[in-house]
Image (cartoon, grey):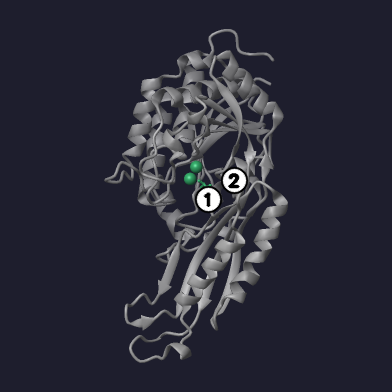
């Protein structure tokens, strides 16, 4: 393994600077409980992108965007025709998100680029840090919009007319984002990439429990998402006899109970979540006529994902209690395995830096899902406190965060000189 012998970029990763930038980013959309709410394509998202542009200008890195608003910060290589090496993650967050989910991969990716720059190493290939649009899928469903369009799995037309919960479309939200940086150069989403590594907090308890600093991520489990709509009949809470009601809420509760039974798993491997549940019209004295809820269902095994996934619709229909039920699948991501060649580099660089590490599978979804279709892809995990994430209490130590970026900086440099 040709590791970097001379002035290695990892020596230029600055723990304090990385921490300051992460805390600076966390100020954008900061919530009173110490988390962030930076919804995709919101004013907060726009402010986060502008901050990336400010940092990029200091180093002379170029910044471009594409039709779905992905943001690319690029350091040129010596070979202008060489396909880039990319790193990155997302700046959008959950409504009660933490400071590090996504932001670590973007701000940390930038720190790696700055460290490579300060080391004076000229890489053959350009290196790009990307902030992917709408990874979380909490405002606009589904998520991973930016990486899915970049990889060609989705077309931009598949996303532009998607509405958020207030009826705003992606198209309208994008227009507002582009207006905040009208002179930003454009490029088409997509193109050849020679390698991708994403740094992310683990969002689980394993690394912390085993006192490992680096997770060499082996892949991501399969994930599916469904939207269930139940239509009954509004009625007067005081007059309508129960036997005549088509109560969408009661039907929804029966359905969710039946789905819980379907998904019961003594090995605790199935991940089944009803995360959003809307009751209409939502008046205390009107029998609910419509309920819409989401199902997020994940599993590492493709057959189980298929078997249980195909049982969702009939289970909903069998428990409709006289209401009309429709089930729409909006995410269907098979499990992915990362490239051995990238995992080997991450592992070797962790060992070179004497960072305790282990292989680990990702339970959470990431933009790296889609990059596996394009190029050798990998991820670097670092521990987070108690494995807590998608929660305002999410936290990680400056030392672990910097260690992950040291491995990233050296790994990107090796890939960019291949
Ligand atoms: O849902 C996920 O796995 C990711 O955090 N958006
Ligand atoms: Mn994330
Ligand atoms: Mn997330």
In this view, which residue lies farthest toward the left? 32
The residue located at (58%, 63%) in the rendering is: 261
Helix, strand or loop status at disc 2: loop
Query: In terms of image quadrants, where is residue 15?
Result: top left
Marks 1 & 2, CB-CB < 8 Å contact? yes
Q: Residues within 10 Å of mark 1 (few under 14, many from 20)?
A: many
**Relative to 159, residue 121 above or below:** above
Considering every residue shown, the one lying at the far right of the view is: 303
Residue 15 in sight:
yes
User: Which residue is painted at 55% across and 31% down in the image?
Assistant: 128
Quarter where residue 192 is shown:
top right
Residue at x 62% of width, y 33% of height: 378
Q: Which residue is mark 1?
A: 68
Give percent across and percent down for residue 164.
45, 62
Q: Which is more toward the observer, 384 or 39?
A: 384
- CA gap, disc 1 and disc 2: 8 Å
Label 2 crowding class (10 Å Cα cut-off): few <14, some 14-19, many 20+? Answer: some
Quarter location, residue 360: top right
**SS for callout 1:** loop
Which residue is disc 2 drawn over? 189
Q: Position of residue 366 (x, y in %)?
A: 56, 43
């Amino acid at each position: 393994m040709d590791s970097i012998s001379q002035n290695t970029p990892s020596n230029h990763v600055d723990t304090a600077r990385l921490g300051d930038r992460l805390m600076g980013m966390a100020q954008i959309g900061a919530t009173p409980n110490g988390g962030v709410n930076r919804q995709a394509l919101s004013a907060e998202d726009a402010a986060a992108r502008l901050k990336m542009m400010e940092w990029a200008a200091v180093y002379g890195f170029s910044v471009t965007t594409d039709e779905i608003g992905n943001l690319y910060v690029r350091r040129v290589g010596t070979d202008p025709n060489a396909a880039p090496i990319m790193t990155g993650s997302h700046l959008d967050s959950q409504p009660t998100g933490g400071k590090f989910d996504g932001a670590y991969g973007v701000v940390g990716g930038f720190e790696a680029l700055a460290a490579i720059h300060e080391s004076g190493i000229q890489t053959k290939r350009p290196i790009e840090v990307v902030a992917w649009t709408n990874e979380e899928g909490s405002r606009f469903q589904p998520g991973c919009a930016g990486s899915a369009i970049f990889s060609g799995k989705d077309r931009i037309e598949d996303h532009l007319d998607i509405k958020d919960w207030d009826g705003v479309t992606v198209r309208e939200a994008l227009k507002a984002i582009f207006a905040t940086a009208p002179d930003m150069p454009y490029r088409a989403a997509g193109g050849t990439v020679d390698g991708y590594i994403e740094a992310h907090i683990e969002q689980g308890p394993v690394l912390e429990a085993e006192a490992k600093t680096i997770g060499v991520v082996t892949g991501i489990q399969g994930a599916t998402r469904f939207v269930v709509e139940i239509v009954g009949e509004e009625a007067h809470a005081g007059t309508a006899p129960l036997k005549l009601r088509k109560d969408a809420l009661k039907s929804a509760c029966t359905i969710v109970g039946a789905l819980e039974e379907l998904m019961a798993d003594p090995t605790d491997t199935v991940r089944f979540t009803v995360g959003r549940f809307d009751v209409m019209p939502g008046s205390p004295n009107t029998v609910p006529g419509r309920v819409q809820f989401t199902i997020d269902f994940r599993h590492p095994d493709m057959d189980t994902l298929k078997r249980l996934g195909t049982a969702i619709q009939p289970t909903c229909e069998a428990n409709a209690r006289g209401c009309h039920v429709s089930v729409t699948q909006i995410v269907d991501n098979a499990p992915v395995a990362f490239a051995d060649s990238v995992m080997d580099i991450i592992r070797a660089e962790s060992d070179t830096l004497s960072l305790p590490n282990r292989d680990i599978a990702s339970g959470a979804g990431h933009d790296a899902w889609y990059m596996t279709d394009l190029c050798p892809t990998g991820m670097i995990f670092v521990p987070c406190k108690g494995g807590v994430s998608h929660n305002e209490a999410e936290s990680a130590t400056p030392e672990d965060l910097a260690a992950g970026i040291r491995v990233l900086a050296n790994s990107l440099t090796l890939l960019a000189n291949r």
